[in-house]
Amino acid sequence: MQDIKEFNLKELEDEFLSLGIKAYHARQVFSWIYKKGVLDFNYMSDIPQALREKLADRFYISELKLLKLLKSADTTEKLLLGLKDGNCIEAVIIPTRDRVTGCVSSQVGCKFGCTFCASGMLGFKRNLTVGEIIDEVIYIKNKAPENKLTNLVFMGTGEPMDNYANVLKAIKIINSAQGFNIGARKITISTSGVIPGIVKLAHEDLQVELSVSLHAADDKLRSQLMPVNKKYPLAQLIKACKDYSLKTNRQVTFEYVLIQDINSSLKNAQDLVKLLEGFRLSKINIIPFNYIQESRIKPATSATITLFKDYLAKHGVHAILRKERGEDINAACGQLRLAYAQK
């Protein structure tokens, strides 16, 4: 049996036709799952009973199990979700006055081993399937205030570009009018700098946002913080990002977690200005580091953050300070899953 969420609409129509089922029933199933959040064929009331039974014999609709829910004072919610095989992943709901953002994972664990991130501390298990990625979005939408989900970021556990095919297929379903109908410009893919994925994405004819975890502006330091830099060094990464921006006419966001006494000095800021010189469609997203006991590194002080941001601004770099959300519930990637596994 196959999870019916592994199919996009055209594939499902073709599959139904091959089974002697009229194509419009595929559109009905899509509406029940993606518009109404129904995950049981028995409740799809406008589909004939005999057909519902046939579908249940041929397909299944996977569903995530809530293992733990943490609620922040700022209304952010962090979810630890159980998969069918016993593994677990994290997702986050971030409501604001005018939108609700969902943060989803793309893998169980992570193989990239960034020193400041909890996602890879338990190692890499496997990629998420298309259906499991969709499951996260369904769960978030059903859980969100008024079942409203306006924005989606692939910034949870895992490296989206390392699970490229499944992530892109899921995004196309999420973006489609028959799916969740979330605009492509409201969907962000975050990568640690996997260049082949950035190159592929530039040719997808999708208006999704690209976010790149940078965190250092010289190769030696970045390789210490992010081992991926040894394979995809900064010069090649920035070139790929510039090419992406030229091809898509989209701004690239560079994420920069400020860590005290490691990447937060005036020299670090100067290196960053130099690295992005002439990169018009780019911005820096400065992120206060969420303390992780196991990492033994410290967040930058408020004064350090202010000095760093001001230096960038004075030298023509578009930099914004990300507002901290969910700090009281350890909402950064991998922290809840790590705590759960250590019990």
Image (cartoon, grey):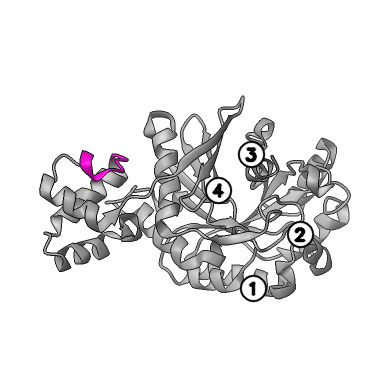
Q: Earlier in the sequence, mark 1 or mark 2?
A: 1
Q: CA distance from mark 4 to mark 2?
A: 36 Å
Q: Is residue 117 above or below residue 150?
A: below
Which mark is in front, 4 or 3? 4
Which mark is in front, 1 or 2? 1
Q: Residues within 10 Å of mark 1 (few under 14, many from 20)?
A: few
Q: Is residue 159 visible?
A: no
Q: Earlier in the sequence, mark 4 or mark 1?
A: 4
Q: Amino acid at mark 4?
A: Ile
x and y percentages locating residue 196 in the rendered image? 57, 74
Q: Amino acid at mark 1?
A: Lys
Q: Residues within 10 Å of mark 4 (few under 14, many from 20)?
A: many
Q: Is residue 19 visible?
A: yes
> Do the CB atoms of the residues marked 4 and 3 lie less than 8 Å apart?
no
Question: Is most of the magenta stretch helix, strand or loop?
Answer: loop
Which mark is in front, 4 or 2? 4
Q: Amino acid at mark 3?
A: Ala
Q: Earlier in the sequence, mark 4 or mark 2?
A: 4
Task: Please state the extent of the stretch shown in magenta in the rendering.
Answer: 36-43
Q: Which residue is mark 4?
A: 89
Q: Is residue 180 above or below residue 11?
A: above
- Front-most of 193 and 110? 110
Q: Which residue is mark 1?
A: 239
- Secondary element at tag 3: loop
Q: Which residue is mark 2?
A: 273
x and y percentages locating residue 195 in the rendered image? 60, 72
Residue 331 is tagged as 3
In the displayed orientation, state which residue is furthest to the top.
73
Q: Quadrant of the C terminus?
A: top right
Which mark is in front, 3 or 2? 3
Residue 275 is tagged as none
Q: Amino acid at mark 2?
A: Val
